[in-house]
Structures are given as C-alpha cells and as structure tokens.
Amino acid sequence: MDVLRLVLIGALVAVATVLALEAVRRKRLAALISPSQFWIRVAAALVMILELVLILAGTYLLAGASPLLQIFYWTGCLILAFLLIVLAILDVRGLLVNYLVERRRIFPDRSSKRSDDRSSH
C-alpha cells in the first residue's frame, strides 16, 4: 500500500508541475492557445489534483468507515473522473478548431478553391 501512496504523490507532483508549465507556456505563446482552452486545461489539472488528493485521502480516511460512506465517497471520485473525461473532450475540440483555423490561414487558396469546385459541379 505504501507504493501506491508514493505513486499517487508522484502523480500529484507531476500534475502540479504540468499546470505550472502550462501557465508559463501561456505567457510566452499566448497566440497559440485560446484563453478558453487555457482555462479548460487549468480546470482539468485542478480536477486531476483534487481527484488524486481524494484518492490518497480515501486510503487513510475510509479505513474504518461504513460501507455506505465508502460508496458515496468513491462515487464522488468517479464523478470527478467523468468530469475529467468531459474536460479532455472539450480540450481536443478546441485543438481541432485551432488546427482548422490555422490551416485555413496558412492555405487560404485551397479552402476557397474546394468550395468553388463543389459549387460548379
């Protein structure tokens, strides 16, 4: 069980480090990531940190707790995990939108040419 706690603490430190690096990267490369996507990533990192803290605390706090309390506690952790999935989907959606915008900016002729080709047929 001590190995699991060390792994959780390591994951907690890793997520906090990634969150700090994302904030630094946002300052340097503000044009590459939209503010909404940045805040989605910050929210995901904070939810991940909360999830890891709850898992770590649950191994200590729920040792002698009633089964009903344990079910509610771990159900809350599961809901947070689903929230992380939703935030990840929103982040990927933002990446795809940014990709398409940049692609149209770099290759403006191709997108207008394709729409002209489709309308002529």
Image (cartoon, rainbow, N blue to C red):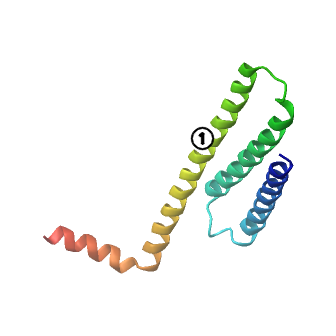
Which type of secondary structure does the marked residue at label 1 adopt? helix
Residue drawn at x 63%, y 69% as measured from the top left: 31
Q: Where is residue 82 in the image (x, y as percent from the top left)?
A: 60, 41
Q: What residue type is labelled 1?
A: Phe
Residue neighbourhood size for the residue with mark 1, other residues' Cα within 10 Å, grouped as few (<14), some (14–19), many (≥20): few
Q: Mark 1 points at which residue?
A: 82
Q: In this rendering, is residue 63 above or below 30?
A: above
Dividing the picture into quadrants, the one containing residue 22 is: bottom right
Q: In this rendering, is residue 84 above or below 35?
A: above
Q: Which quadrant: the C terminus?
A: bottom left
Residue most extreme to the front:
1
Q: In the image, 88: left or right of 107?
A: right
Q: Position of residue 49 (x, y in %)?
A: 77, 48
Q: In the image, 92: left or right of 108?
A: right
Q: Which quadrant: the N terminus?
A: top right
Q: Where is residue 75 in the image (x, y as percent from the top left)?
A: 66, 30
Residue drawn at x 84%, y 48% as measured from the top left: 5
Q: In the image, 32: left or right of 7?
A: left
Residue drawn at x 18%, y 68% as measured from the top left: 119
